[in-house]
């Protein structure tokens, strides 16, 4: 079984996809983390993030490895052998991931890897192009969204819990910038896949969204 969950930043995709995978006993893959790893390396090398040729050369010397715990849920990501699980979570890397993800060479590299991971596995994947490109044949497709004010407030709280004190307006403007970039790029823009059910997570708790998705799948 393949389940695709797409949607804009901060809609709760990762948390919900992971919870859903746990309930159904499936593997979970966070594809955004993979774009973040590419963005991180490009930033570290000081590359122009829109330079497809430079990114291509970089990827030729890059090894990205996804390791999963025995439960199939906890994902560890190794960039050239380094565990980059926390390094990829900064605001700077969020924006860099969005920038490099607009480049075809990056998408081709990662989509091939993601499809290889999904082969012969029951999996829930979350991202921007799962229902449209990575798993177009997925049995279940969801487009998870929420008002951008709500998404920014959630991100703001997450950052505060990590000890980062950033103005809510800054979080909101960075989120809007990413949404705009992700949904207007030429390569696999963020759009609702045909057949995907739109779920607004704005007024719902994580558990409520998970229950709703299970109900929509006929699993409850
Ligand atoms: O889901 P996230 O916020 O970790 O993703 C980071 C960026 O990566 C996002 O702004 C756009 C890009 N991305 C993508 O283009 N396609 C995906 N399947 C997942 C993420």
Image (cartoon, rainbow, N blue to C red):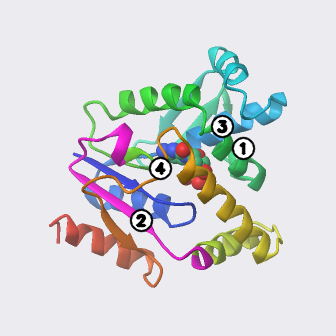
Please tell me which of labels 1 and 2 falls first in the chain: 1
Quarter placement of the N terminus = top left
Q: Is residue 32 visible?
A: no
- Identify the mark nearer the N-term, 3 or 4: 3
Does label 4 or label 1 sit earlier along the sequence? 1
Label 2 element class: strand
**Mark 1 — residue?**
96
What distance separates the C-alpha of mark 3 from that of mark 4? 15 Å
Q: Kindly identify the residue that appears in the image at 39 percent across and 45 percent down.
A: 130
Asked if disc 4 is less than 8 Å from ligand 1, the answer is yes
Image marks 1 and 2: residues in contact by CB distance under 8 Å: no
- Where is residue 119? Give x, y as percent: 29, 30
For label 3, the crowd category at 10 Å Cα-Cα, with few meaning under 14, some 14 to 19 and many 20 or more, is: many
Residues under numbered marks 1 and 3 in contact, where contact means CB atoms less than 8 Å apart: yes
Q: Residue at x 36, y 71 (%)?
A: 199
Q: Earlier in the sequence, mark 4 or mark 2?
A: 4
Residue lying at 33% horizontally and 60% vertically, measured from the top left? 142
Which element type, helix, strand or loop, lies under badge 3?
helix
The residue that mark 3 highlights is 100
Towards the viewer: 211 or 185 = 185
For the magenta stretch, what is the residue range?
131-150
| Picture coordinates of residue 8, whole percent (x, y) | 52, 60
Question: CA separation, marks 2 and 3?
Answer: 23 Å
Report which residue position mark 4 lands on.
127
**What residue is at 79 percent from the left and 36 percent from the top?**
43
- Give the quadrant of the C terminus: bottom left
Cα distance in 3D space between marks 1 and 3: 6 Å
Packing grade of label 2 (10 A; few <14, some 14-19, many >=20) is: many
Asked whether 136 falls inside the magenta stretch, the response is yes
Q: Residue under circle 2?
A: 144
The reply to whether the residue tagged 2 has its Cβ within 8 angstroms of ligand 1 is no
Q: Give the percent coordinates (x, y) of residue 120.
A: 25, 31
């Amino acid at each position: 079984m393949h389940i695709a969950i797409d949607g804009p930043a901060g809609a709760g995709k990762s948390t919900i996809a992971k919870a859903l995978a746990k309930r159904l006993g499936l593997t979970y893959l966070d594809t955004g983390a993979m774009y973040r790893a590419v963005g991180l390396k490009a930033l570290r090398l000081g590359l122009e993030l829109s330079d497809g040729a430079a990114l291509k050369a970089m990827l030729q010397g890059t090894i990205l490895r996804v390791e999963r715990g025995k439960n199939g849920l906890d994902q560890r990501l190794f960039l050239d052998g380094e565990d980059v699980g926390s390094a990829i979570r900064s605001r700077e890397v969020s924006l860099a991931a969005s920038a490099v993800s607009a480049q075809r060479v990056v998408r081709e590299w990662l989509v091939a890897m993601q499809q290889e991971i999904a082969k012969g596995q029951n999996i829930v994947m979350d991202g921007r192009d799962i229902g449209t490109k990575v798993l177009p044949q997925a049995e279940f497709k969801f487009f998870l969204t929420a008002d951008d004010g709500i998404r920014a407030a959630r991100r703001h709280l997450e950052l505060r819990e990590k000890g980062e004190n950033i103005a809510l307006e800054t979080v909101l403007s960075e989120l809007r910038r990413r949404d705009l970039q992700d949904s207007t790029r030429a390569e696999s823009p963020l759009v609702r896949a045909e057949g995907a059910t739109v779920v607004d997570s704005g007024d719902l708790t994580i558990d409520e969204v998970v229950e709703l998705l299970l109900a929509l799948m006929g699993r409850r």
